[in-house]
Amino acid sequence: MEKEIYKIIDKEKLNIVGESIENAHGLPNECYLNGPYTNIERKKIFEDKWVTIGVASSIPNPGDTKPFDLLGIPLIIIRDKKNQVRVFHNVCSHRGYKLINESCSLKNVLRCPYHSWSYDFEGNLIATPHLGGINKNEHVDFDKSKSKLKEVSSTVWLDLIMVNISGNELPFEEYIKPLEERWADFWTKEDQAMISHAEDYGYFLLEAKCNWKFAIENYCESYHLPFVHPGLNAYSKIDDHYHIQGLPNRFAGQGTVVYDPRFKNDKKFPTFPGWSKEKEKHAEYVALFPNVMLGIHKDHYYAYWLEPVSHDFTREHMEIYYVGEEAARGNTYKSLRKQNFEQWHSIQSEDLSIIEGMQQGRNSPVYNGGNFSPVLDNPTHHFNKWVATSLTDNDFSTN
């Protein structure tokens, strides 16, 4: 696969991404435009890495099922009868028919509409009508156990459904360990268990006419705050922010030291009981590569995950969580949830024209991937190096 990427992108264009920030360029145009690059990226990043495809709270009951297409790979997300979230390839083992096209709640089986082959919620093939002839549902030479649905390696972390299609990545516990160790200074495991998804004002969808990587690049840095988010910058200024660059090279972002939520009538959300007193006014905004942007605060958490649809179209899903059921769903905090929702919707919407403008600019044949501020662009450069490393298997993380 390494040789294949160099047939599409000149080797020097990718190697220079891994240079020190003073000398580096960003990823070349080919990484954002239509062409054969897209298939390589799907394999090296979206199949080989841990990727977010949804949230577990969206399928709360056994039998709840929804389809998800990951850059053309059809998947099924289902909650089984033991309350475990599972992910399967959305294809019948018989003739390759796509099993599920819409979200639904199933009673006992996943049934293929084509020949009515049926599977239980653990992927086992349990019914094969007329397999051996009319009204003969078995055959001595057919072993059902060899025709299970193909399960995808998956786990749930902070309500996020994470998958590793190829199974080539580290176990998720190892993959996420560097970020968990960092955030152990902020909140406890007991705090994390308290997160509750808001039923009202807990979700919004934005559609961006651009490559998914622009959303990550923009999220990682605070350089643009005074120019794109003047309202936010009025109370959380650029010089109140610090950079986050996680090694091993799996996440990057920014933090603030002046988080102080301001709602009408001076009302407040409840806070995580184990939140560090030393981090009282800290909040962190981290992109966990490749496709989810996280925000942790003393009074709420959000996950802003990306659904790449094509090289120039991305769905952005915002999921907002609070401390316990009452804060997330009770009437006492409804007006606060509305205000918080509107704030985040406004901030993320302000970024849309920026990331779409970068997509348009990448059509210029003279653009070389861009240069970086040696002081303010470090997290974005960090992400670019991660992509280049993933594509080439070269380790650029030390530069």
Image: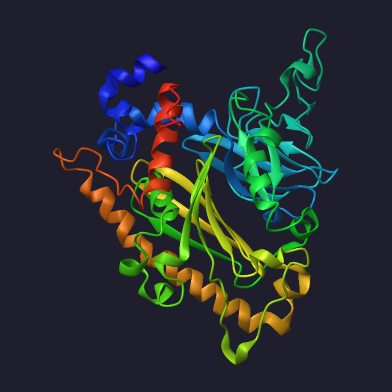
- Residue at 50 percent of width and 75 percent of height: 342
Where is residue 346 shown, x and y percent of the image? 44, 72
Quadrant for the N terminus in the image: top left
| Residue farthest to the top, as pictured | 141
Q: Could one spot residue 99 in this view of the protein?
A: no
Where is residue 127 shown, x and y percent of the image? 79, 28
Q: Could one spot residue 388 in this view of the protein?
A: yes
**Image vertical order of residue 300 relative to residue 103, above or below:** below
Quarter residue 246 falls in? top right
Q: Is residue 43 left or right of residue 260?
A: left
- Residue at 72 percent of width and 64 percent of height: 275
Q: Nearer the viewer, residue 304 or 263?
A: 263
Q: Nearer the viewer, residue 32 or 70?
A: 32
Quadrant for the C terminus in the image: top left
Scheme of image coloration: rainbow
**Image vertical order of residue 20 relative to residue 204, above or below:** above
Where is residue 386 shown, x and y percent of the image? 45, 34
Q: Is residue 147 left or right of residue 354?
A: right
**Image vertical order of residue 290 relative to residue 43, above or below:** below
Where is residue 115 shown, x and y percent of the image? 67, 29
| Residue farthest to the bottom, as pictured | 265
- Residue at 49 percent of width and 74 percent of height: 343
**Image vertical order of residue 320 relative to residue 14, above or below:** below
Quarter residue 384 falls in? top left
